[in-house]
Amino acid sequence: MADTKLITFKVRRYDPDKDTAPHWEEHKLNVHDGMTVLEALHEIKAEQAPTLAWRSSCRMGVCGSCGMFINDLPMLACQTQVLHLNTDVVTVAPLPNYDNVKDLVPNLEPLIEKHAAIKPFIIHTNSKEIDEPTGEFIQSVEQRDEYSQFTFCIKCGLCLAACPTVATDPLFLGPQALAQAYRYTVDSRDCGLQERLEAIDAFHGPYQCHMAGACSQACPKGVDPAFGIQLLKRTLVLDSIGFGKKEKHLSKVMPLADVVKQIEEFAPPPRTVK
Ligand code: FES
């Protein structure tokens, strides 16, 4: 059997039906190389704390549901190996800057509401083309590069947990929503800046960002929301003095017949193995 190391887990517990305040529980566990905090929690739950609650799903850093405050930093439990923390004591608490539903479960509703507020979808002036498309909007590699990194956001909410502005202003839209506002606004197919202004060009919008950069350090997918917020500020300033990109043209639509032709041209050869 692989070598193991005895680790003490200090887990913050809170059951709103029983507890008037959160408290800490200690659990000792033999941890082997490669074991993640999420796997450790599963073992603790199976052997020592059957009512321990948290949220997780994919176990592979994709769904974004297992965000926790591990040794005082927001991290994904499924992506954090216990022995990589280089400590004999691991503290696990719910993400800060969110209400605590139970034990390690944060209430992520504000994250989702702020994300929805910035209209996270392509808004085009020609709704007919959106509803009944006659072709495909062409986008160059350079145009896609303008927003590409922001598409990696998995909405785990770690950036809001790390943000010092959210800590003092819960209404601040926050790094996740603001970076996504930039992602859609800069998209060559989008004409929605004016529709988003009500949400993003407000008191609790990008100008409240202190540029601490904690959001970008916390992001488990390498997104740089702090940079996105600064780019969004530039977009708003340019728009306010009449240099915004207001119209993007439908002439860039590629007819469906050409799309089909392109797909056929790049189609893989037929299977030879039955
Ligand atoms: S369980 Fe899906 S990101 Fe961790």
Image (cartoon, helix red, strand yellow):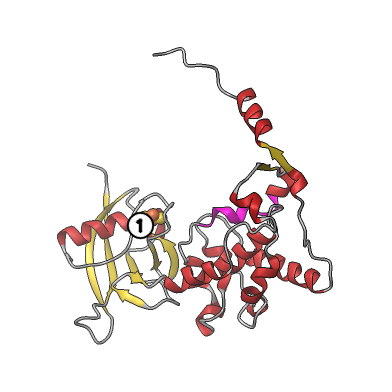
Residue 78 drawn at (x, y percent): 37, 55
**Does the stretch in magenta take in 147?**
yes
Q: Residue at x 64, y 76 (%)?
A: 198
Image-quadrant location for residue 55: bottom left
Residue 14 higher or lower than 67, as above or below: below
Residue 209 drawn at (x, y percent): 63, 76
Residue 250 drawn at (x, y percent): 74, 49
The amino acid pointed to by label 1 is Val
Q: Residue at x 65, y 35 (%)?
A: 256
Ligand number 1: quarter of image: bottom left
Q: Residue furthest right?
A: 242
Depth check, front residue: 272 or 160: 272
Q: Residue at x 53, y 81 (%)?
A: 171
Residue 199 drawn at (x, y percent): 61, 75
| Crowdedness near tag 1: few (<14), some (14–19) or many (≥20) residues, C-alpha within 10 Å | many
Q: What residue is disc 1 on?
A: 82
